[in-house]
Image (spheres, rainbow, N blue to C red):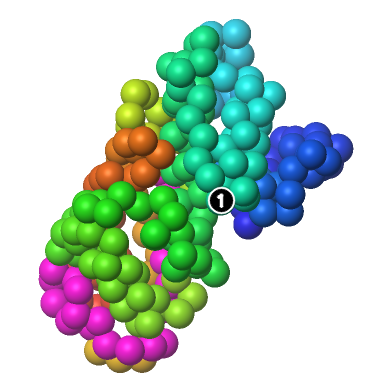
Amino acid sequence: MFRTANVSPSATTSICSPASLSSRARNGVCRAYQWSHPPDVDPGMNRKRGTSRKSVTKPSRRDFVAHSAAVAAAASLGGTMSLSAQPGGSMSSILDNKAIVGRWFTEFWGNPWNAKIIDELAAPDMLLQYSLHAPRKGRDDVRAFMTGFRATFPDLGFTGAADLIAEGDYVVGRWVGGGTNTGAAFSDFLAGSLPAATGRKMHFTGATVLKVVNGRIAEEIGLDDGVTALTQLGLIRRS
């Protein structure tokens, strides 16, 4: 689970432990909040040095948690909930989408991962596309990709490198992470196949744009620092 930074222990407790929520709902709130506020990022200071705090406009933590809690609580009861039809619905929809993407990044790309998140949050025809890999389409294809990726890199994991940014149906996230090749061979890199258990480590960064439609992730298209990753794995040589 992601750590929060620049938030007092009492504030973190109040965010992650609402008395009215079930354990599953609390976990959903925490995951969404902590992805959006990764380590060493001040929730109110996502700005260039020298820029006044007052010049930054973003939803308050209370607004984000309230909407995330409602979405997580609905999920814990086996249902779905959309707040976009309420007054100020545009902001509600954006907060809903950020909460969904926060959960997806944590449970799909984090370590450990939750394979069930694919059926819960991915659209049936979801597109997954990164510069390192061939595009994947549909839940089964996405599941096969991640299962194979983690069989090769058992410690695979990625975390947020900045606040999530959302506009309309789209959410953008920056991330960092990697893993160690201690498992099976991997043939999904476009640059070539990776032998089994080489012991090589990859650690790289990237950015992803996700499209959320009706509470489901329809697209995840990312650009990663593939040159760094492939060089570390020995699939391309340093010039």
Q: Quadrant of residue 179?
A: bottom left
Residue 35: x and y, percent?
Answer: 55, 45
Quarter holding the C terminus is bottom left
Q: Quadrant of residue 170?
A: top left
Amino acid type, mark 1: Gly
Residue 220, visible in the rendered structure: no
Observer-nearest of 119 and 105: 119
For residue 106, above or below residue 215: below
Total marks drawn? 1
149 in the magenta segment: no
Observer-nearest of 185 and 62: 62
Task: Report whether 37 appears left or right of 201.
Answer: right
Quarter holding the N terminus is bottom right
Residue at 50% x, 67% y is 113
Residue at 40% x, 28% y is 166
Residue at 50% x, 41% y is 80
For residue 87, above or below residue 138: above
Residue 10, visible in the rendered structure: yes
177 in the magenta segment: yes
Residue at 61% x, 14% y is 53
Number of other residues with Cα within 10 Å of mark 1, as a class: few under 14, some 14 to 19, many 20 or more:
few
Which residues are drawn in magenta? 174-194
Residue 59: x and y, percent?
Answer: 57, 19
Task: Report whether 28 appears left or right of 119.
Answer: right
Residue at mark 1: 78
For residue 162, above or below residue 194: above
Residue 90: x and y, percent?
Answer: 43, 17
Observer-nearest of 225 and 223: 223
Secondary element at image label 1: loop
For residue 77, above or below residue 108: above
